[in-house]
Amino acid sequence: MAFIFDSFLFFFVIIKQVELLKNKFGFDDAFNYKKESNLNQTLQRFFPEGIDIYFENVGGATLEAVLQNMRLHGRIVACGMISQYNLVEPEGIRNLFQIVAKRIRMEGFVVFDYFANYYKFEEMTVQYIKGGKITYVEDIVEGLENAPSALIGLYEGRNVGKQVVVVSRE
Ligand SMILES: NC(=O)c1ccc[n+]([C@@H]2O[C@H](COP(=O)([O-])OP(=O)(O)OC[C@H]3O[C@@H](n4cnc5c(N)ncnc54)[C@H](OP(=O)(O)O)[C@@H]3O)[C@@H](O)[C@H]2O)c1
């Protein structure tokens, strides 16, 4: 099954992170989207049989290229569209008809809907982390005064791993 998990944008990252994705996180393959001139062709190369599941966090041109490469009855979990947040005029997606032709199911996901399950999630995740089944990397900045620059960094690809702001060590 071909699976793009770009949440926490694991799939589309800078060059040294490609190795991080493959060696530390165990992805079969990865590429640097910033080095690719034609995303549609890149996806064709990486997913010659098409994509079954796409975890959407980018939007815009990336979503358009993914739709073009989805398989029949593919599924898209729409979690975020980071490429669109700072645009004055959001980009349009020109090939939405792919959803019809390929019978793609696309559904939005918002974490707040699942807060009731938080403690269950925490308990389960801690076990996975302890057992080495979940690996993670954090990018830590110290002090609330550095939070705005850390937030801007998310849109500039400055962070490597989950951006955390430590407000106090006490
Ligand atoms: N639905 C929900 O409940 C929910 C909750 C939280 C977050 N989200 C979504 O999850 C996604 C990740 O957010 P996060 O806070 O966890 O941060 P994150 O995983 O650290 O993602 C930030 C990364 O996005 C990449 N990026 C920035 N601009 C981009 C662009 N124009 N095109 C492609 N990649 C771009 C940068 O990586 P590069 O260096 O590779 O460019 C940056 O390191 C966002 O889409 C966010 O909206 C959804």
Image: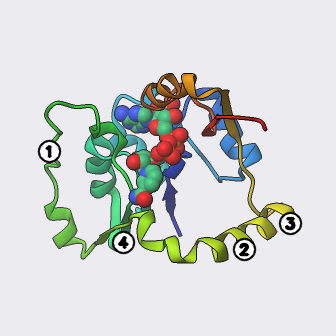
Q: Residue at x 69, y 68 (%)?
A: 122
Kind of residue at disc 4: Gly
Q: Quadrant of the C terminus?
A: top right
Kind of residue at disc 2: Met
Mark 1 vs ligand 1: CB under 8 Å?
no
For marks 4 and 2 on the same chain, the one whose residue lies earlier in the sequence: 4
> Could you classify mark 2 by the number of other residues whose Cα lies within 10 Å: few (under 14), some (14-19), or many (20 or more)?
few
Q: Badge 1 is on which residue?
A: 92
Kind of residue at disc 1: Gly
Q: Residue at x 64, y 26 (%)?
A: 143
Q: Quadrant of ligand 1?
A: top left
The residue sitting at the front extreme is: 170
Kind of residue at disc 3: Gly
Q: Nearer the viewer, residue 82 or 68?
A: 82
Q: Badge 3 is on which residue?
A: 131
Q: Are marks 2 and 3 in contact (CB under 8 Å)?
A: no
Whole-angstrom CA distance, mark 4 to mark 1, is: 21 Å
For marks 2 and 3 on the same chain, the one whose residue lies earlier in the sequence: 2
Q: Badge 4 is on which residue?
A: 74
